Amino acid sequence: MMNWTIIFGVANLVVVLIGGVGVILQMRYENRLLRHDFTNLAQRQTTIDEKIEGLDRKIEEEMDSNRREHGEVVAAIRQKVSDDALYVRDHFLRKETFGPVMTRVENDIKNVGDRIEARLLRMEAKIDTKT
């Protein structure tokens, strides 16, 4: 007769070995999947980096093109603004000179008013002498 304890012990050992081999195989499979996923991630990252570099080059080219096309317009506008600033500086009053200029204008208007009044008085005197 066979000893059932030995048979069950051997059976348990076989089950444990099969389970251990199964766990090892499962771990190797998952490791392979992870390596494959990391390889795919690296490839995707490389692709994304290449696309970003391509877009950067495209943007730089467009900016250079815009500078060439519109640079003269911007330079002309800048020159016009500078010319206008110089014209305003040379032809209009400054804050410090505004008061004296207004006093001069008021005196000129008063002188013109006095001359008109004097002329009207002379005209009235002539009219009075003729009537």
Image (cartoon, rainbow, N blue to C red):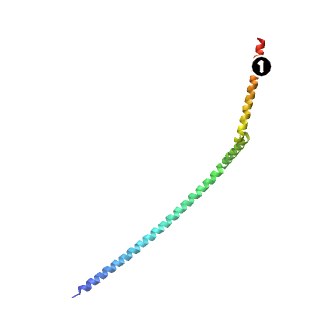
Q: Residues within 10 Å of mark 1 (few under 14, many from 20)?
A: few
Residue drawn at (66%, 50%) of the image: 71
Query: Considering depth in this image, is 115 or 21 the residue closer to the camera?
Result: 115
Task: Tell me residue 101's x, y (percent).
Answer: 73, 36
Q: Position of residue 121 (x, y in %)?
A: 75, 20
Query: Label 1, on which residue?
Result: 122
Q: Which residue is located at x 41 percent, y 72 percent? A: 30
Q: In the rendered view of the protein, which quadrant contains the C terminus?
A: top right
Residue 6's place in the image compared with 29, above or below, is: below
Q: Is residue 76 visible?
A: yes
Q: Secondary structure at mark 1?
A: helix
Q: Residue at x 76, y 21 (%)?
A: 119
Q: Position of residue 91 (x, y in %)?
A: 73, 39
**Going by the image, does 64 lie left or right of 111?**
left
Residue found at the far left of this picture: 1
Classify residue 41 as left or right of residue 119.
left
Question: 9 or 86, which lies in front?
Answer: 86
Q: Is residue 65 left or right of residue 131?
A: left
Q: Is residue 56 above or below residue 88?
A: below
Give the percent coordinates (x, y) of residue 29: 40, 73
Q: What amino acid does circle 1 point to? A: Arg
Q: Residue furthest top?
A: 131
Q: Residue at x 63, y 54 (%)?
A: 64
* Apparent side of residue 95 relative to residue 59 in the rendered image (left or right): right
Quadrant showing the N terminus: bottom left
Question: In the picture shown, does residue 106 fall above or below 57?
Answer: above
Q: Is residue 92 visible?
A: no
Residue 100 to residue 14: above or below: above
Figure label count: 1
